[in-house]
Amino acid sequence: MSPGMILIAILAATGPVTYGYMKVREIIVVKAAVKAERNAGVMACNARVAQIETANKTAVTKAVEEATRAEALVPDTPEGAELVKLCNASASCRSRGKL
């Protein structure tokens, strides 16, 4: 083979080699970009979840405190003779005759 033919063969092979190199490089760059975006999305999602969790904890704590205060206002249920006396004072309770 003459040197000219070798040069033509090399030049003909550079196109596919360059295309292959660029294609592999593009795949690597795209994977890195996707990974970076996914990580950013995960961080944003985690921040939103933490915000919701904090709001829920605050609401639950407030509800528990309100329930505790309301519980203190409710009188204890009468026991024994006091309950019978209370039931006898109510016509609907007397008519059932359960006490």
Image (spheres, rainbow, N blue to C red):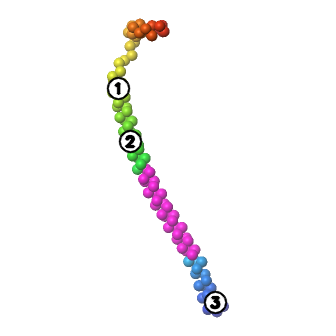
- The amino acid pointed to by label 2 is Ala
In this image, 25 relative to 69: left or right? right
Q: Are marks 3 and 2 in contact (CB under 8 Å)?
A: no
Per the model, the C-alpha gap separating discs 3 and 1 is 97 Å
Q: Label 1, on which residue?
A: 70
Q: Start and end of the magenta stretch?
A: 19-46
**Above or below, comparing residue 55 to residue 26 in the picture:** above
Tell me where residue 75 appears, x and y as whole percent: 35, 18
Per the model, the C-alpha gap separating discs 3 and 2 is 75 Å
Tell me where residue 79 appears, x and y as whole percent: 40, 12
- The amino acid pointed to by label 1 is Ala
The tag earlier along the polypeptide, 2 or 1, is 2
Give the residue furthest to the right.
1
Residue beneath the point at 39% across and 36% down: 60
Tell me where residue 13 appears, x and y as whole percent: 60, 81
Q: Label 3, on which residue?
A: 5
Q: Label 2, on which residue?
A: 55
